[in-house]
Image (cartoon, rainbow, N blue to C red):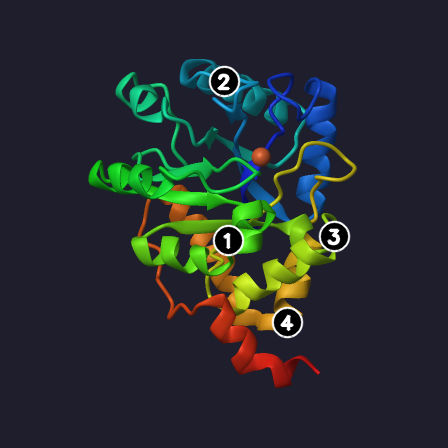
Amino acid sequence: MGLIDLHCHILPGVDDGSKDLEMSLAMARVAVKQGISHILVTPHHMDGTYLNHKADVLQKTAAFQTALTTAEIPLTVFPGQEVHLTGDLLKALDDDDILFMDEGGRYLLLELPHSGIPEYTEDMVFELQTRGITPVIAHPERNHGFQQEPDRLYDFVKMGCLTQLTDSSYLGVFGDKVEKLTSKIINANLGFAFASDAHNFKGRRFLMDAAFNKLTEQAGEQVAQQFNKNAKAIINGDDVVMPEVAKISAVKRKRRFWLF
Ligand SMILES: [Fe+2]
């Protein structure tokens, strides 16, 4: 099994990711080169700009898989959505217009607005959980709310949420602050999997091999392997082993000496 990418805008012409099939196939070749074998394609949905309805994504993902196979690119794609947190989410669930990260409908890739954590987020998480859904918070390290109050991420994980960290965040593409917060999230055991969130070849791009190399160096082989195991468990709808989690503020104090 290669690396599993849980968040990626590789589906052609559906959002601000890949423009067309040619670009998607070129991105797929980069992904395979980095050791990625499976990608959950996650076009933006209900973010105020893009609507990518479940039926369309299912059809377009199947067509893209056929194109990958024809081009002899050894990559498996699964249909998904990056679901934006909005008051319309429950209705979309009722209307069967939501794709999950697994076929069984257990894990939901949930994107919060970058500007912060809306007041109703906890209520929505609770509502999703009562429906048997586990939210996987997309790139919390890039959210202003978690940047200002990192310990709120601990609260969400204690509530039962999982998190997906973005490879390029960990490598400094979004700046020093985001890179450091990503490391802190990992040190507090509040990070569960890496994903590329790749949109193109610059900026938000595939950096999965480099991120896993860095994780192996900084946190050890076992943690790196666990990240990919968690990604597999999420895709398969299996349990994710919950480690002992800590508040980010507590880890910072405790581990300060080890940073020098
Ligand atoms: Fe995304």
Separation of residues labelled 3 and 4 (CA atoms): 19 Å
Q: Which of marks 3 and 4 is nearer the N terminus?
A: 3
- Quadrant of the image occupied by residue 183: bottom right
Mark toward the viewer: 3 or 4: 3
Q: Which of marks 1 and 2 is nearer the N terminus?
A: 2
Q: Mark 1 points at which residue?
A: 193
Residues packed near mark 3 inside 10 Å, few (<14), some (14 to 19) or many (20 plus): few
Name which residue type carries label 2: Asn
Q: Does 68 appear above or below 206?
A: above
- Quadrant of the image occupied by residue 8: top right
Quarter of the render that holds ligand 1: top right
Q: Are marks 1 and 4 in contact (CB under 8 Å)?
A: no
Which residue is found at the position 68% from the left and 24% from the top? 18
Q: Do the residues labelled 3 and 2 touch (CB within 8 Å)?
A: no
Q: Name the residue under label 4.
A: 218
Give the camera-side residue of 161 and 73.
161
Per the image, label 2 sits on a secondary structure element best described as: loop
Separation of residues labelled 1 and 4 (CA atoms): 15 Å
Q: Mark 3 points at which residue?
A: 175
Query: Residue 222's x, y, as percent?
Result: 51, 70
Q: Earlier in the sequence, mark 1 or mark 3?
A: 3
Query: Residue 63's x, y, as percent?
Result: 54, 17
